[in-house]
Image (tube, rainbow, N blue to C red):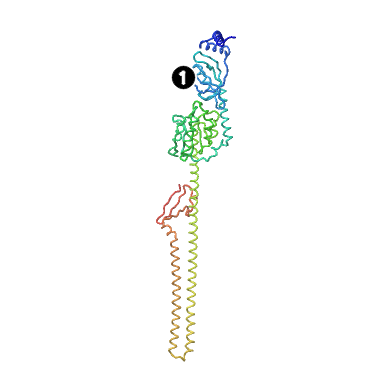
Amino acid sequence: MLSKSYLVAILVLLWGMERAVFSLIQVANSIKKTLKERYHASYWVKAELYKVNLTPSGHAFPELVQREGGKVLASISGIIWKTNFDRIRRVFEQTVKEPLDDGKEVLMEVRIDYHEVYGLTLHILDLDPAYSLGALHKLRIDTLKALSNLGILQKNQGLKFPIPKRIALISAASSKGLSDFMSVIQRTQGTYGIETFLFNSQIQGNQGAKSMVASLKRIEKVKDFFDVVVIVRGGGAEVGLSCYDDLNLCKEIALFPLPVLCGIGHSTNLTAAEMVCYSHAITPSELAHQVVSHFQIQSELLTQQGIKIQLAWNNALNYASQRRQLIAASLVRFVYTRIRFEKDRTVNHERAIGYLTPAIVRYSVQQFKGITRGLADNGGRQIQHGAHDLWKIQHRLLHQGERLLTGQRKGLDGLEKQIQLLSPEAVLSRGYAIVKAKEKIIDDPKKIKRGEKIKIHFYKGTVNATMD
């Protein structure tokens, strides 16, 4: 038998004779040759542009990934030469209305390349923008469906809309849309005094949704200082709108405690944010006009109410004037009737006194004679006493008659004074005037025709005039 050491020596010798050793360049060239033979054509591959990595020279070296459930399943580096990148980006933005930047899901035509130094790369020859457009449309549909499932799709639209006196603005300070919005608002500043406060934000691109959500959260902390929130973005190239389909942004808008208005300047299909906000307009200027219209409507309503109040006041004055005239006329008739009644009663009293006094005297004389005869035996004192009593009765009757006549005269004097106070001269002396046309008293200016001559009677003098 062979010893153990001898066997080991034979194995070492055999191993050294069979092992092949290659240089790194040989391995790289072998891989390159194999890939070139196997993947000689171009292929369509879908992936996410995790990072575009655009260089100052115009070349792009994107990082391509495939995710599933938030986990990266594969990652390969890519390359787009400047000549291709300019064309690809232009066509992509014209079709998708979005910038070709980080986070986009794309369908690429690629050729598999392997370089001895830079390793495996996907040489991107072209992109199919229709695929990305469909992905963005799916994002919008998914966002709207999620909001609908939560029951908040129209929640912001159900808020009570106040007069938008204090506006929280979400926009970029340099945005033309902000400038257009403010130019309309500032033209009415002296009339309505609308106040605005800018929350400077990114309003498009990858960070747009996060930036606007952060601004909404800041506004919510001071919501009592504002009436509405306005999101405006300038027009021009319709790119960078995918952030307005972001679920977090749309959810924040739907649940926001103040009405949110959007004017994001585009003419394509509505974004999810525009569908869930309180109201929207196709441009910031149009949105500003909508805001101002709420003040114009309220101003018109107030004007109409003022006209109604003025008409009611005028009608009340006319009614009161007519009532005063009727009451005055009724009072004059009453006074004249009462004076005639009192005069007639006084005359009747005078006649009655005139008739009664002689009769009473005659009756008293007869009584006196009877008493005289009946008391003849009583002596001269009783006769004198009876005569004195008779004289007192006669004197009392005369005195009462005069006092009654005096009272009646005083009553007549008081009535005459009342008549004098209500006479036309007395009324005119208190600052009133009488207007006559064709010698008829006018109690309503509507009865006077334009150009008709009138006379205005004052306490002292008369003025002739012509109705204008």
Q: Residue furthest bottom?
A: 377
List the residue tagged with mark 1: 55
Q: Amino acid at mark 1?
A: Thr
Q: Residue furthest right?
A: 1
Relative to 109, say whether 332 is above or below.
below
Q: Is residue 447 visible?
A: no
Residue 186 falls left or right of residue 97: left
Query: Residue at the spot x=44%, y=81% of the render?
Result: 392
Query: Residue at the spot x=48%, y=87% of the render?
Result: 371
Question: In the image, residue 118 lies at what x, y percent?
Answer: 49, 15
Q: Nearer the viewer, residue 233 or 70?
A: 70
Pointer 1: residues within 10 angstroms few (<14), some, or many (20+)? few
Q: Nearer the viewer, residue 401 or 203?
A: 203
Q: Is residue 112 visible?
A: yes
The quarter of the picture where the N terminus appears is top right
Question: In the image, residue 254 lies at what x, y percent?
Answer: 53, 36
Q: Residue furthest left?
A: 460
Q: Nearer the viewer, residue 314 or 230?
A: 230
Relative to 27, say whether 106 is above or below.
below
Identify the element where label 1 is drawn. loop
Residue 35: which quarter of the image?
Answer: top right
Query: Residue at the spot x=44%, y=29% of the render?
Result: 174
Question: In the image, residue 114 lies at what x, y percent?
Answer: 53, 14
